[in-house]
Image (cartoon, rainbow, N blue to C red):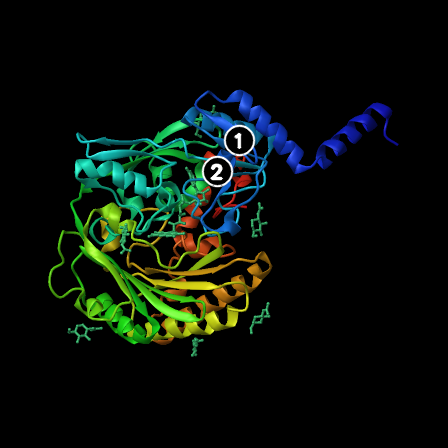
Amino acid sequence: MLRPLLRATYVALLLHRTRTAAQDAASTCQQIASAISDASAVFYNPDPSYLADIAHYATSSTDESVCSVEPGTAEDVGTILSILDSSQTPFGVKGGGHASNPNFSSSTGVQISMYRLNRIDYDSSTGTVAVGAGNVWDNVYSALEPYGVNVVGGRVSGIGVAGFTLGGGYSWLTNQYGLALDSVRGFELVLPNGTVTDVTESAYPDLFWGLKGGYNNYGIVTTFTLQAYPQGQVWGGQLIILGEYIDQVNVATANFAANVTDPKAQIIATYDYEEGALLAAVMLFYDAPSQPAGIFDEFLAIPALSANISTRSFLSLVQVEPTTTSESMRGFSNTVPFEEITLPLLETIVAQLEYWGAALSNSSAALLSYDVEPFLPSILTHGGPSAYPWTRDQRFLPFNMGFFWTDAQYDGDFYEAIVESSRNLTDTAVQEGQTQVPSAPLYPNYALFGTPVGSMYGESLAEMTMLKQTYDPQNVMGLTGGWKVTG
Ligand SMILES: Cc1cc2nc3c(=O)[nH]c(=O)nc-3n(C[C@H](O)[C@H](O)[C@H](O)COP(=O)(O)OP(=O)(O)OC[C@H]3O[C@@H](n4cnc5c(N)ncnc54)[C@H](O)[C@@H]3O)c2cc1C
Ligand SMILES: *[C@@H]1O[C@H](CO)[C@@H](O)[C@H](O)[C@H]1NC(C)=O
Ligand SMILES: *[C@@H]1O[C@H](CO)[C@@H](O)[C@H](O)[C@H]1NC(C)=O
Ligand SMILES: *[C@@H]1O[C@H](CO)[C@@H](O)[C@H](O)[C@H]1NC(C)=O
Ligand SMILES: *[C@@H]1O[C@H](CO)[C@@H](O)[C@H](O)[C@H]1NC(C)=O
Ligand SMILES: *[C@@H]1O[C@H](CO)[C@@H](O)[C@H](O)[C@H]1NC(C)=O
Ligand SMILES: *[C@@H]1O[C@H](CO)[C@@H](O)[C@H](O)[C@H]1NC(C)=O
């Protein structure tokens, strides 16, 4: 028998433990609201700010949190983290909200939205730009345009600076300057214990390395200092091509991938299956006001349903109207790290698209999209060591598979299908001699949840785990989702 006082304590403890998570988070929200400065604010459902804070590109990545908080200073981020730690409240950290994995940047506890940290300060004396972690790339391109400079960022509209950069970042400028993370000169980081730190290659070489691929494992980044590069008008845009001409798209894409060596030239060949039909949306890019003869001729010779191609600003190219829209749909992505893009591989990609398109089209408005992204063999020579990719001996191509649907009851079907299709394409690549594909680094910004972290971080994982023990011994960042190096 427990003595009365002890029993009372025991009962109180039990009651404490069985209080619902929502009640706990509600009091955490109040605690945060009373501790943060006027620069920051807490919101509740259905405040429009709350709804914007929890929103994601894929609705399956949105969770209804108990409250959202928009920190306006790095110090407030530290205060918030300390409260979340002491109350052990689950939280999500959102930049642009483009994560295609559930709860990577959302939570049923507290949603942190970096939205207010939106500075974009170009320093012409250092040739760098300080970019707040709440920005999307559109804002950055727009702000830099008057200075005639640009940064290595996203290729379509709406992507967040934070997740994109912390996970890698394949850009229209990658052939010339490397990944987005190769352009980072410094991070302002709020450590898991709430301390605001400036991470640079000289001040914290270990964290500088680990943040390049390590997302939220070591704290919350509030500002990225990025290298700026000269930028003028560009040439390019989008071609929409009907399924009957898909063979010509395959040939043009294989030839471009094998033959084009000009680092200013790039394409994304997207193969879509929507409403029973196959089509291609090909983005063409050249980093000058006009294209040199020859490079894109094969694409331009294919009869197009529509073409939106011109000399334009970088921002205008990034904002070319998408024809297929996946907004307000559930969505998962996955990836296969190809060594090269060949014609037989493209033919299998199309066959897979048709197979899964038909198999899944009974499951609530399926849209399937496979993005073929050729890059030069030299792209990893533009930067130093980073947690991702764990080897720079050879570059692998970040092929993206995107599956979208509307009804949550089919989540499991789409998960299995995208895994199955990536397995087919991995096996296909191996059969044609791409033997390193099964052990190559998977791109963490495209990989499907459930993928072992070792498949992305490989030989970096041991060092990343040590970093985690050094900077987050209490596992504060274990309260939030994402690719976790321990746990
Ligand atoms: C339509 C579309 C187009 C895309 N195009 C490209 C492309 O061209 N090239 C490419 O490389 N990738 C592309 N991606 C993938 C994209 O890079 C990832 O989805 C990326 O993670 C998005 O960043 P975000 O800030 O929008 O995401 P979020 O969902 O906000 O965050 C993603 C992850 O980063 C973490 N995180 C966010 N902010 C911080 C912070 N301040 N500190 C620490 N951790 C943080 C989150 O917790 C989460 O784990 C695309 C995705 C979509 C949906
Ligand atoms: C995150 O989502 C995945 C997939 O739905 C689930 O398995 C996992 O338990 C979730 N984690 C948290 C912390 O909610
Ligand atoms: C590369 O270019 C040559 C000459 O134009 C062409 O014959 C060839 O098919 C192209 N593609 C590949 C994969 O070599
Ligand atoms: C072409 O893309 C631009 C965005 O860059 C858009 O404003 C314009 O409406 C598009 N034109 C057509 C004909 O779709
Ligand atoms: C991949 O799928 C295609 C059909 O989409 C099939 O013809 C091929 O045999 C499969 N390949 C492998 C290696 O499983
Ligand atoms: C859709 O079709 C697939 C394959 O034919 C089948 O496995 C699945 O159960 C079907 N789903 C529904 C909801 O009918
Ligand atoms: C927070 O962590 C950093 C890095 O481990 C350490 O230098 C600093 O002293 C810690 N601050 C506090 C207040 O514990």
Q: Quadrant of ligand 3?
A: bottom left
Please report contact status of discs 2 and 1: CB closer than 8 Å, yes or no: yes
Residue 138, image x, y percentages = 31, 43
Residue 406, placed above or below residue 255 = above
Element type at marker 2?
helix
Residue 21, image x, y percentages = 65, 37
Left or right? Give the position of 111 relative to 392: right
The residue at the point 19 percent across, 32 percent down is: 126
The residue at the point 41 percent across, 44 percent down is: 214
Residue 43's mark? 1
Tell which of 296 and 313 is nearer to you: 313
Residue 259 shows in the view: yes
Tell which of 418 and 70 is nearer to you: 70
The residue at the point 65 percent across, 32 percent down is: 24
**Ligand 1 within 8 Å, label 2 CB:** no
Residue 15, image x, y percentages = 75, 32
Q: Give the residue at mark 2.
A: 53
